Amino acid sequence: MTRPDWQKPLDRYSFSADQLAQLDCLLAALERDEHAPTTVRERARALDVHLADSLVALDLDLLRDERDIVDLGAGAGFPGLALAVALPGARVHLVESQRRKCEFIERTAAAAGIENADVICARAEDWADGGARNDVVLARALAAQPIVLEYAAPLLRLGGALVDWRGRRDEQEEEAAALAAAELGLGLSEIRHVEPFAGARDRHLHVWRKTSETPDRFPRRAGIARKRPLGAIAIAASDRNRR
């Protein structure tokens, strides 16, 4: 039987026929559901921008054996749903604050028969049941890195990891992230350059490990991380001291 062309970019992962069928359902949902919360819905483009870009995290060995995974700001369900298909032994919690997006994710997961994923319709700061127990937190196109670190740290168990999708490297943002991480009990493990699909440029996975317990003052109230990012405060104070 001739394979559909769309499957060829996924050959590197050795998915079963059932997994490929589930991934096909994800692409179909984006294309057919007029309420899909993304501007990228056409199949060929979605295969690259959503599916391949999500699955590239499988390049990291740390993701293979983990059991509790959180997708922060899940949006249209990526990377969480794609990785739930790829990692059937894991439990993937998709955290999304907007009800319309939560409903789309739930419909899509049900249509694709993805049973190891659940939707948490709440802000990350308000998800009390998720505190300090997850192996991996995923964040893709969510916010500036110091903000992502603050969202993720309280949700991770000691030794757990954050995988943060980033584009072109930004020295100033990385400096701010390092300052924020020092307050949150996180340490940078690696920055992996990746090419999830042909023609992709400046794609990086930033991996942070939880090396010590996050102080009890985190998470701060909802919205504060964006209004007063940790690293930005430290950099501003340092700049004032230099004057």
Image (cartoon, rainbow, N blue to C red):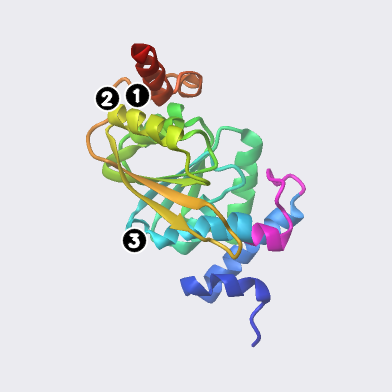
Please provide percent x and percent y for residue 20.
57, 70
Viewer-nearest residue: 25 or 72: 72
Q: Which residue is mark 3?
A: 61
Vertical relation: 223 (above or below) 61 = above
Name the residue carrying label 2. Answer: 215
Magenta part of the chain: 34-47
* Residue labelled with disc 1: 218
> Horizontally, is 47 left or right of 223 in the view?
right
Q: Quadrant of residue 240?
A: top left
Task: State the CA–CA distance, disc 3 to disc 1.
Answer: 29 Å
Find numbered disc 3 in the image and state the secondary structure of the residue it sits on. Answer: helix
Q: Residue at x 70, y 63 (%)?
A: 44
Mark 3 / mark 1, whichever is N-terminal: 3
Residue type at numbered disc 2: Pro
* Tag in front: 3 or 1: 3
The picture places residue 95, in percent across and down from the top left corner, at 50, 39
> Looking at this view, is 22 or 141 the one in front?
141
